[in-house]
Amino acid sequence: MPAAIGILGGTFDPPHAGHVAVAVAAHAQLGLGEVRVIPAGQAPLRTGAPIASAPDRVAMCRLAFAEHPWAVVDEREVRRAGMSWSIETARELAQEFPGRRLIWILGADQLARLDRWKEAAALCGLVEFAVLSRDGIPTEPPAALAGVLRLTVLRAPAVQVSSTGLRAALRRGDSARNGLPLAVARHIDERSLYQD
């Protein structure tokens, strides 16, 4: 049986060491054949548009995951018009990879509001979920999905970094290198991103 495919979606504005760490943990612990890193065009539960352009966010994802040959940067959501609905992405992947297990990788903060995702129950029928606990957030699914959600809890060292915090540091002119892969930090410097 072919290895399962991991799906790591997000705005990746910018991609950071925490994103890489969760993908590495999922790949190793779940025996994934690949992890599809999918930058969102416009994430439905995020207020405001991404700050970096879609081409910059795709480029930064490629740089962040360049050392991991099993990571595939998938541009389908930035090419799709309108909101980036996870259910649409899951349906497309299920058609492209019939019979393959699809495992959506997410943080505990996203798991807690999974019932707010579009067609959440249908999504649970298409994919399994793997969650990385962080900052002491519980890894319990919303009660409305408890009967349909298939969930694995990942173990990984805590990486205390967030895209929001990194953008704020970059705006202040602080070094954000501790939370960024070196090639991503270089891209941000070269393109003067997040400096407004």
Image (cartoon, rainbow, N blue to C red):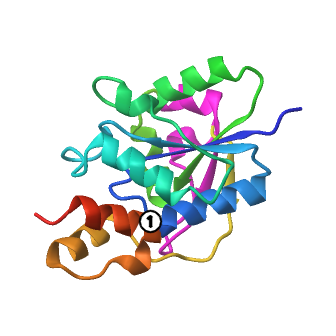
Name the quadrant containing residue 93: top right
Image point 41% across, 31% down: which residue?
77
Q: Check disc 1 and report its element: helix, strand or loop.
A: helix
Name the quadrant containing residue 13: bottom left
Q: Is residue 85 visible?
A: no
Image point 45% across, 71% down: which residue?
182
Viewer-nearest residue: 91 or 38: 38
Q: Residue 121's x, y, as percent?
A: 54, 30
Q: Quadrant of the N terminus?
A: top right
Q: Residue 70's x, y, as percent?
A: 69, 48
- Judging by the rendered image, the residue that carries numbered circle 1 is 183
- Asked if residue 139 is positioned above or below residue 85 in the image, the reply reads below
Residue lying at the far top in this picture: please name it.
95
Q: Is residue 100 left or right of residue 131?
A: right
Viewer-nearest residue: 172 or 99: 172
Q: Is residue 170 left or right of residue 116?
A: left
Image point 21% across, 51% down: which residue?
51
Magenta stretch, residue numbers = 120-148
Q: Amino acid at mark 1?
A: Ala
Q: Is residue 179 visible?
A: yes
Q: Is residue 154 left or right of residue 61?
A: right
Q: Residue 69's x, y, as percent?
A: 67, 51
Q: Quadrant of the C terminus?
A: bottom left
- Within 10 angstroms of label 1, few (less than 14), some, or many (20 or more) residues? some
Q: Residue 94's x, y, as percent?
A: 64, 23
Q: Is residue 124 magenta?
A: yes
Image point 65% across, 56% down: which residue?
68
- Asked if residue 122 is positioned above or below residue 185 in the image, the reply reads above
